[in-house]
Image (cartoon, rainbow, N blue to C red):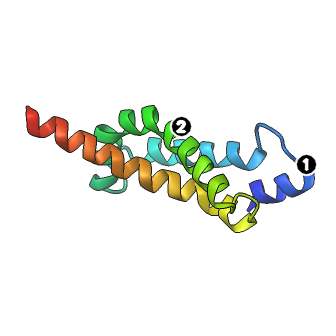
Amino acid sequence: LLSISERLILGDIQIFIGTNLMVLAIFSYCIKYPDGINNQVEKIGNNLSMYVYVIHVSIMEAVNWLEKMIGINDFAVFQWVRPIIVIIISLSFAALVYESCRDKQ
């Protein structure tokens, strides 16, 4: 909420105070609890993060192209949902790539 408020008040800036506070909170939590929260999240981070990092920009561009083609790029709701769609598609694609590479080994 802090980052959203900052965006409304300060406009389009690169680094929000709320983002820095979230990073510090997550970092502190990881230091305090090194075993983590959930094994599934750890598996996703260990196995899929490289694939997600490599492909997410292409998927984001494809989603942007598709939304412009359909004509929904001006809807505010879609602009808020777009990152979630990109994350879901990126994770799904990364899981497929990981599983196909693992099957070949």
Asked whether 41 or 72 is in front, the reply is: 72
Residue of label 1:
10
Location of the C terminus by quadrant is: top left
Q: Amino acid at mark 1?
A: Leu
Q: Would residue 51 be found to the left or right of residue 75 on screen?
A: left
Residue at point 73%, 50% (across, down) = 18
Residue 35 visible at all = no
- The residues bearing labels 1 and 2 have C-alpha atoms spaced at a distance of 26 Å
Quarter the N terminus occupies: bottom right
Question: Is residue 104 rendered to the left or right of residue 77?
Answer: left
Can residue 56 be seen in this snapshot?
A: yes
Rendering coords of residue 28 (x, y %): 54, 44
Q: Label for residue 57?
A: 2
Please, is residue 81 above or below residue 83 in the view? below
Instruction: Determine the residue located farthest toward the front in the rendered image.
Output: 69
Q: Is residue 12 left or right of residue 52?
A: right
Quarter holding residue 76: bottom right
